[in-house]
Amino acid sequence: GDSVTQMEGPVTLSEEAFLTINCTYTATGYPSLFWYVQYPGEGLQLLLKATKADDKGSNKGFEATYRKETTSFHLEKGSVQVSDSAVYFCALLPNTGNQFYFGTGTSLTVIP
Amino acid sequence: NAGVTQTPKFQVLKTGQSMTLQCAQDMNHEYMSWYRQDPGMGLRLIHYSVGAGITDQGEVPNGYNVSRSTTEDFPLRLLSAAPSQTSVYFCASSYRRTGGHYGYTFGSGTRLTVV
């Protein structure tokens, strides 16, 4: 069935370090792919998305490219800030149906 | 434009009690869902609705009921609370456009503790 696997955390980085959070998926056809962010005590917010192969989603300095050949959607940021500390979720929406599939989340802490 | 509003934000229940978690959205989204979030398990879908009068089960529906009498409201009912239902509950809404969903809009969550 459809599923998402993302790298386990927690991840701790120094400010201005490079961030990669890996996400791979299993699905038939061409699903839509998303990254959500959850700040402490809050709900999930859409960070970026991609709806077809080779699309690049970007927002707030974060980027992720939809790679059909490797079934991946890795999240990257060139220089993290303390304010990026949060839990990041990779998610998949199959091209048919309405059910999202979420990864287990990766906690990121950025230290000054 | 309030988005997705969940009430209450916090609740403590005794085992066996029932209660309803409220969810309302003012964006005219046809799709709404309930998720629970547990440590190390991400978000798991409880129930979802594709429009008023239509609901379906998700991954973990046991012990929960839903109804969708209007586009705006999607309450989640716990029939007889159990400690295993201690969790953070999120309601979400979305709509479909050409090219796929734009992604769900989530409420701020309800933290439920069953003792």
Image (cartoon, rainbow, N blue to C red):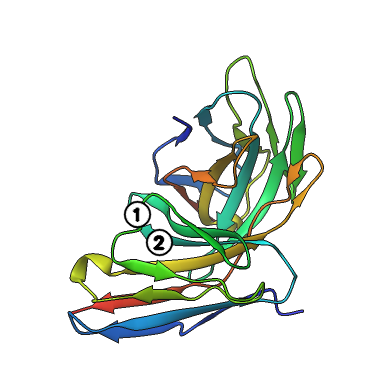
Amino acid carrying mark 2 in the image: Arg
- Say whether marks 2 and 1 touch (CB < 8 Å): yes
Marks 2 and 1: which is nearer the front? 1
Instruction: Inspect the image, locate mark 1, and give the three-letter code of the amino acid beneath it.
Output: Val
Q: Nearer the viewer, residue A97 or A82?
A: A97
Q: Quadrant of the C terminus of chain A?
A: bottom right
Q: Residue furthest right?
A: B98
Asked whether B45 or A47 is in front, the reply is B45
Chain at numbered mark 2:
B
Q: Residue furthest top?
A: A69
Estimate how packed mark 2 is, as few (under 14), some (14 to 19) or many (20 or more) residues with alpha carbons within 10 Å. Answer: many
Q: Position of residue B9 (x, y in %)?
A: 46, 82
Residue located beneath label 1 in the image: B60
Q: For residue A85, what is the image quadrant?
A: bottom right
Mark sitting earlier along the chain (2/1):
2
Instruction: Provide the residue designation for mark 2.
Output: B36
**Is A55 positioned to the left or the right of B108 in the image?**
right
Residue B25 location (% of width, % of height): 66, 74
Q: Chain of mark 1?
A: B
Direction front: furthest residue: B53
Is A70 situated above or below A55? above
Question: Residue sitting at 22 percent across and 65 percent down?
Answer: B84
Q: Position of residue B24 (x, y in %)?
A: 61, 78
- Residue at the image position 46 percent from the left and 42 percent from the top: A103
